[in-house]
Image (tube, rainbow, N blue to C red):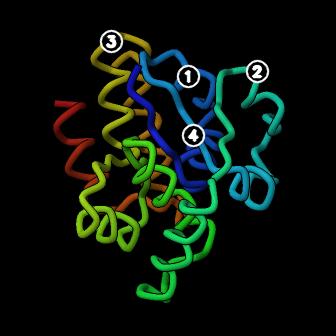
């Protein structure tokens, strides 16, 4: 089964839209590095970290080589947090795909040959397999567009809304 290593922004955004449990209905496995799980997944609305584990989130540790890779990523890309670098290193060493809205993480993934997707890709996947209806997708996109703290680029949200809403 394909494993997606999520950064915190994706999990938080789905939590804010009450779609986190729906995301876990997809045919993918979702994973995070233990550092991210313990340090960044503190406020998930009505979900908590144990809910994520019950839904199927895998919490994985890096071996010493993975930690060294994460540190090397951060030393070369100071704008990335150590937690982000742990997620990238986990994906790199395990052959997983990174799931992020962070353009710096996507840039690093591209440079390191790590496959990556974003939040809208997950929404597309949920829509394609009827986990979300078109009206649910529209509602989620509109909520993200109205939220000034949403990490999804507003232009991309507007374009996607036009395409989905017809």
Residue at disc 1, secondary structure: loop
Q: Which residue is mark 1?
A: 24
**What residue sits 44% from the left and 32% below the top?**
3
Q: Separation of disc 3 and disc 1 at Cα?
A: 13 Å
First along the sequence among labels 4 and 1? 4
Residue at disc 2, secondary structure: helix
Quadrant housing the C terminus: top left
| Quarter of the figure with residue 130 | top left
Q: Are marks 3 and 4 in contact (CB under 8 Å)?
A: no
Q: Which mark is residue 14?
A: 4
Packing grade of label 4 (10 A; few <14, some 14-19, many >=20) is: many
First along the sequence among labels 2 and 3? 2
**What residue sits 69% from the left and 56% below the top?**
36
Residue at disc 4, secondary structure: helix
Q: Are marks 4 and 1 in contact (CB under 8 Å)?
A: no
First along the sequence among labels 1 and 2? 1
Front position among marks 2 and 3? 2
Q: Which residue is mark 2?
A: 54
Q: Which residue is mark 3?
A: 129
Q: Which mark is residue 163?
A: none
Packing grade of label 1 (10 A; few <14, some 14-19, many >=20) is: some
Q: Nearer the viewer, residue 108 or 151?
A: 108
Front position among marks 4 and 2? 2
Packing grade of label 3 (10 A; few <14, some 14-19, many >=20) is: few
């Amino acid at each position: 089964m394909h494993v997606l290593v999520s950064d915190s922004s994706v999990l938080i955004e789905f939590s804010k839209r009450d779609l986190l449990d729906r995301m876990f209905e997809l045919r993918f496995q979702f994973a995070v590095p233990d550092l991210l799980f313990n340090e960044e997944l503190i406020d998930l609305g009505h979900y908590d970290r144990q809910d994520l584990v019950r839904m199927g989130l895998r919490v994985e540790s890096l071996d010493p080589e993975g930690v060294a890779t994460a540190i090397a990523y951060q030393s070369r890309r100071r704008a990335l947090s150590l937690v982000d670098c742990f997620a990238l290193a986990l994906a790199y060493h395990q052959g997983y795909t990174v799931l992020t809205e962070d353009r710096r993480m996507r840039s690093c993934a591209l440079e390191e040959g790590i496959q990556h997707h974003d939040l809208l890709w997950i929404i597309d996947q949920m829509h394609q397999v009827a986990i979300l209806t078109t009206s649910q997708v529209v509602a989620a996109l509109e909520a993200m567009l109205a939220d000034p703290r949403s990490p999804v680029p507003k232009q991309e949200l507007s374009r996607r809304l036009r395409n989905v809403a017809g």
